[in-house]
């Protein structure tokens, strides 16, 4: 028998269908609610709203579970590469050897960006944030590649073009911001090797990609590759629902990711840890400040809308952080502060009662810093990692027969009807 939920309004009972997901998550289907009852639902921040049915990523926030296309994040982190994981997210299953080779060939073919785009970079004010530049440049890609995605082949090419070029655009923006010569991608390098090389190679200091750093970068990007209906992915889907092109949709996702409550948290964590050190390293003071309801300060890298336990990505990131710093023989005082902060917060009643644990951003900035990535590029690193997620979610929404233009309703609380007053009577 199909499960239903009963809703009683003004003594009248309405039966609403219940949708059950693969892992037994339940949703009350309210698609006909307004038409049948005249009521809408109220859910600021959409914490109780399922905006779609998706076959891409499964998260269980109570038990700290994350799977891409059914595969646990821990297994992907141990065995996969970023490109393989991207294929998995976009196509739904792991690639065969041949499919992986094909995708690598296309990523290589698509890795250059139009030379005219370099002009754009140089015209941004020198203090522009790289996320600002990346969002604008991704939107601009549409002007360079205006072809319509009318066949499966064109859709595939466009998705891979984005995946490949965003990495190049990010590295070019860094080189130009430093006033240095742009480094072109190399066909003999993998996706991650190429990124590090485009970032750090210079005529006076040739760069040889280090295997451990390349592995750490693969892992960093795998951990960020998708996270179901988070703020930026929701933005990609909402913008895409107007049937705008994928470049504009992803550009909106990049803008959404920039915020410090979302992807910008990885930069904010480092700023916070540096601030704590500057003020004498008093961890308890920072924790007390985060608990003070009269103070807007929050512990950056702590808490999550869905995870009410340790973020599984943060666990892996913490181990990677230890490995990378040991390998590079770096002793970063920020890591000591982060460890102490975690220890104090996890024993504190406020953090326990509010289920606040470190999230993926808590240790990731320290890993990126050790790799030599400048702080203002941290969120760009997150954006490159999240691309396979945005692309696959965009594609899924385009193929979804139930997908409609995103257009929430509201409860109006403004002024009652009034008359227009001529300017002299106001
Ligand atoms: N420090 C102190 N208090 C916190 C924190 C924090 N980091 N996070 C949540 N709280 C408190 C909050 O003050 C509220 O307390 P109360 O109920 O007593 O008023 C309660 O916990 C619930 O907070 P909320 O804002 O309603 O929770 P949310 O689910 O809307 O917020 C969050 C999730 C990630 C925005 C929030 O935890 C936060 O601001 N964290 C810091 C920023 C951060 O690290 N963001 C990265 C998230 S992971 C990367 C990604 O996927 O984007």
Image (tube, helix red, strand yellow):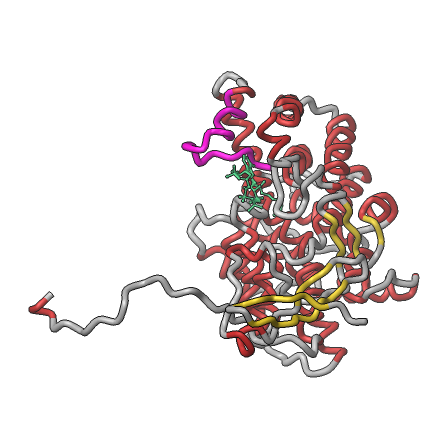
Apparent side of residue 136 relative to residue 333 in the rendered image (left or right): left
Check the picture and name the quadrant holding the C terminus: bottom left
Examine the rendered structure and indicate whether residue 403 appears above or below residue 23.
below
Q: Is residue 162 magenta?
A: no
Of all residues shown, which one is farthest toward the right? Answer: 97
Residue 301 in sight in this render: yes
Give how far across and how far down residue 59 sits, in percent.
74, 52
Residue situated in front as seen by the camera: 81 or 268: 268
What's drawn in magenta, residue-wise? 285-301
Residue 144 in sight in this render: no
- The number of discs equals 0
Look at 57% across and 33% down and name the residue there: 270
Apparent side of residue 295 relative to residue 88 in the rendered image (left or right): left
Image quadrant in which you'd find residue 393: bottom right
Give how far across and how far down residue 127 sits, in percent.
44, 46
Give how far across and how far down residue 187 sits, in percent.
78, 58
């Amino acid at each position: 028998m199909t499960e239903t939920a009963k809703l009683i309004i003004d003594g009248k009972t309405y039966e609403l269908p219940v949708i059950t997901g693969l892992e037994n998550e339940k949703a009350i289907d309210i698609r006909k609610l307004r038409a049948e009852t005249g009521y809408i639902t109220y859910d600021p921040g959409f914490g109780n709203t399922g905006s779609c049915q998706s076959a891409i990523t499964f998260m269980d926030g109570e038990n700290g579970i994350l799977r891409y296309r059914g595969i646990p994040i821990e297994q992907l982190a141990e065995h996969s590469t970023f490109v393989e994981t991207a294929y998995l997210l976009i196509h739904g299953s792991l690639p065969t050897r041949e499919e992986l080779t094909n995708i690598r060939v296309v990523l290589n073919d698509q890795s250059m960006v139009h030379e005219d785009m370099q002009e754009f970079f140089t015209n941004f004010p020198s203090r522009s944030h790289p996320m600002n530049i990346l969002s604008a440049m991704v939107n601009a890609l549409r002007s360079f590649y205006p072809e319509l995605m009318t066949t499966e082949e064109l859709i595939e090419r466009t998705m891979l073009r984005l995946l490949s070029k965003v990495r190049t655009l990010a590295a070019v923006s860094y080189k130009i911001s430093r006033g240095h010569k742009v480094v072109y991608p190399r066909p003999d390098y993998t996706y991650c090797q190429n990124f590090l090389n485009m970032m750090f190679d210079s005529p006076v200091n040739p760069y040889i990609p280090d295997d451990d750093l390349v592995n750490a970068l693969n892992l960093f990007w795998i951990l960020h590759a998708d996270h179901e209906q988070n703020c930026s992915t929701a933005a990609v889907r909402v913008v895409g629902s107007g049937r705008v092109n994928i470049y504009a949709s992803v550009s909106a996702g990049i803008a959404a990711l920039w915020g410090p409550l979302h992807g910008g948290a990885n930069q904010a964590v480092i700023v916070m840890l540096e601030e704590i050190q500057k003020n004498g390293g008093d961890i308890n003071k920072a924790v007390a400040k985060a608990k003070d309801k009269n103070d807007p300060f929050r512990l950056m890298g702590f808490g999550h809308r869905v995870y009410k336990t340790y973020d599984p990505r943060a666990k892996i990131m913490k181990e990677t952080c230890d490995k990378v710093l040991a390998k590079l023989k770096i002793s970063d005082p920020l890591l000591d502060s982060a460890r102490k902060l975690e220890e104090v917060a996890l024993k504190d009643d406020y953090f326990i009662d509010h289920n606040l644990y470190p999230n993926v951003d808590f240790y990731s900035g320290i890993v990126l810093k050790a790799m030599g990535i400048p702080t203002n590029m941290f969120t760009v690193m997150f954006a490159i990692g999240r691309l396979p997620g945005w692309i696959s979610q965009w594609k899924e929404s385009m193929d979804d027969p139930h997908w409609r233009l995103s257009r929430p309703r509201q409860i109006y609380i403004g002024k009652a009807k009034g008359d227009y007053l001529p300017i002299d009577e106001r």
